[in-house]
Image: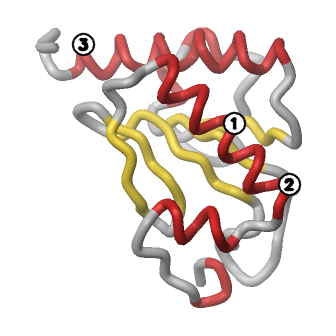
Amino acid sequence: MLAGGLRFATVQECLDFLPPHERALTGELRELLVQEAPELKERISFNVPFYKVRRDICFLWPASVLWGRRKTYDGVRLGFSYGNLLQSGTGYLERGDRKQVCWRELTALMPADERMIRTLLREALRLDAERAGGLR
């Protein structure tokens, strides 16, 4: 069950649903992603913002958009769809029991996080281009 049975048609609907702290942090992360990679296309999938060029690159999962019946973390989870392939993410990203998706749970965007996210995003974009045969 997602977000208590709610279905968002747009990213703005998702943002409007969020409590102020999660809305602000999600906005900061969205801005960072677009600033670093303006070629990303944003869409709603699983009720949260996903970003792609050729394939899904990453997503923002605010804690208030539930997967299941209860909130299991605070803040916003920044996930990378192919995080298992990101060398820069070792020690920074969590994997849990997932095969390829890795994430970082953030309650604030600190300068060190911002630097690491930029590095991971550049690496993920390079990987996306390589997997597409190098076409840009």
- Residue receiving disc 1: 28
Which percent across, then down, holds residue 114? 73, 18
Q: Which mark is residue 106?
A: none
Location of the N terminus by quadrant is bottom right
- The quarter holding residue 87 reads top right
> How crowded is the residue under tag 1: few (<14 C-alpha within 10 Å), some, or many (20+)?
few
Give the number of the mark in front: 3 or 1: 1
Residue at (68% x, 78% y) in the render: 68
Which residue is nearer to you in this view: 38 or 71?
A: 38
Q: Could you tell me how far apart the alpha carbons at marks 1 and 2 are, in whole angstroms?
A: 11 Å
The outermost residue toward the bottom is 5
Residue at (49% x, 38% y) in the render: 58
Q: Which mark is residue 130?
A: 3
Mark 3 or 1, nearer chain start: 1
Describe residue 32's horizontal placement relative to residue 90 as left or right: left
47, above or below 86, in the image: below
Describe residue 11's horizontal placement relative to residue 1 as left or right: left
Q: Mark 1–mark 2 contact, CB under 8 Å?
A: no
Type of amino acid at the residue the image marks with label 3: Glu
Which percent across, then down, holds residue 102? 61, 36
Residue at (62% x, 62% y) in the render: 15
- Secondary structure found at label 2: helix
Type of amino acid at the residue the image marks with label 1: Glu
Q: Mark 3–mark 1 contact, CB under 8 Å?
A: no
Give the number of the mark in front: 2 or 3: 2
Mark 1 or 2, nearer chain start: 2
111, above or below 66, in the image: above
Which percent across, then down, holds residue 45? 42, 62
